[in-house]
Image (spheres, rainbow, N blue to C red):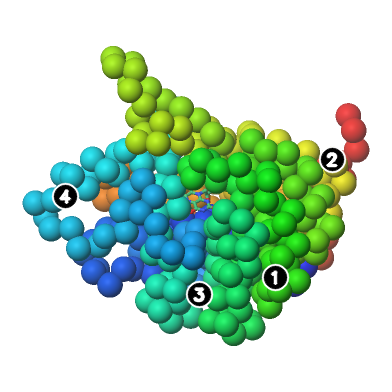
Amino acid sequence: MVELNGIRLRNRTVTSASLLGYGARPANRFFPYGLSPVGQFVPLERLGAVTTRTLTLEPREGHFTTRTDWRMREWPQLVRRYRGTLRRVDEGWLNAFGWCNIGIEAYFRDYFPRTDHLNRIVSLGGFSGDEFRQLVEVVNERAPAGSIAAVELNVSCHNVNFDFDEIVEDVLAQVVPLSRHPVILKLSPDADYVAHAKLAERHGVAALTAINTVKGLRLDPETGAPLLANRYGGISGRAVKPIALRVVAELRDAGIELPIIATGGIRTFDDCREFFWAGADAVSLGSELFLSSFAGYLASPLAARRVVSLARRVEQYEQTLAHAGPPRLRAVPAA
Ligand SMILES: Cc1cc2nc3c(=O)[nH]c(=O)nc-3n(C[C@H](O)[C@H](O)[C@H](O)COP(=O)(O)O)c2cc1C
């Protein structure tokens, strides 16, 4: 067990918001929606925590679908939609799900009871301080103290086409004093993340997650049409790892002391070590380990073994560091 400023994690390896859906299979077991096929082979209870998909007050289709009753003959249509929301591009992934989710009430009714063997971080998304306050009221009521590790505030998503800068301070002012669970603020590499981190410190946030996806665009070279239905999307995976490292290091350079959960292109144990050097306190696994092409998902059991082995190596690494904690870039003397 690791404690980061009141956030209890089973170890320092968690999963990034949404990559494992809500942490449990949907009711229809044969519908490959809601949990990465890789995740189905990982004993998720062995991870530090699993972060849910971002939940909103009302269900949202976003740019994909919340339907889980697609008939087989409708699958081509479903695949087309999927390709309009998620594409493998340039050593990374481009997605615009746009907070496609079943809504917070349905999450607590259908998924929360089935995931109580996991340590959970519940990701929340809204368009005003009031919406975030209402979301936290629901979490306070439905999740007894200690039943989740934290709530994570997603005020950093591109795919809902909203300027979160305007509301960050109001969200923190309303939510942090109200929440009975520790609060994590998720930072965008495209916003003034140092300013947001300072606001987080001032308002009593427990930790930061860095980074959310980087805004990007890809076009079909023949037609000029955007690959994604939302035109722009968020880039994740290998392509963003150096950006995520930069953000973590810059937060530390700016004197931010809050624990940082780092996510951005992590594939190997050495990637984790790099993030710890840059100043992270925990690492979060996302696109590189849980997303694949349809054919690639056939190797999900193998990919799952890589996840388990990576988490084990991070645990062993910590033991070798004894009580020193993860190393920090700022502790390294300048060359
Ligand atoms: C398909 C997909 C869906 C995502 N959905 C969410 C989401 O609902 N909420 C959120 O905060 N981040 C979401 N993210 C961002 C990830 O949690 C993570 O911050 C980002 O992908 C960077 O990490 P990675 O490169 O390791 O994937 C999503 C990323 C992907 C690839």
Q: CA distance from mark 3 to mark 1?
A: 17 Å
- What residue is drawn where x is 63% and y is 67%? 133
> Looking at the image, is mark 2 or mark 1 nearer the viewer?
1
Closer to the N terminus: mark 3 or mark 4?
A: 4
Closer to the N terminus: mark 1 or mark 4?
A: 4
Closer to the N terminus: mark 4 or mark 2?
A: 4
Q: CA distance from mark 3 to mark 4?
A: 31 Å
Is 157 situated left or right of 275 in this image?
left
Badge 2: few (under 14), some or many (20 or more) residues near its Cα, within 10 Å?
some
**Closest to the observer, 312 or 53:** 53
Badge 3: few (under 14), some or many (20 or more) residues near its Cα, within 10 Å?
many
Closer to the N terminus: mark 2 or mark 1?
A: 1
Q: Residue furthest top?
A: 222
Name the mark on residue 182.
1
**Closest to the observer, 81 or 91:** 81
Q: CA distance from mark 3 to mark 2?
A: 34 Å
Circles 2 and 1: CB atoms closer than 8 Å: no
* Residue wearing tag 3: 118
- What residue is drawn where x is 64% and y is 36%? 190
**Residue type, mark 3 in image:** Leu
Picture quadrant where residue 326 is located:
bottom right
- What residue is drawn where x is 41% and y is 25%? 218
Badge 4: few (under 14), some or many (20 or more) residues near its Cα, within 10 Å?
few
* Residue wearing tag 4: 75
Dot 3: what SS? loop
* Residue wearing tag 2: 253
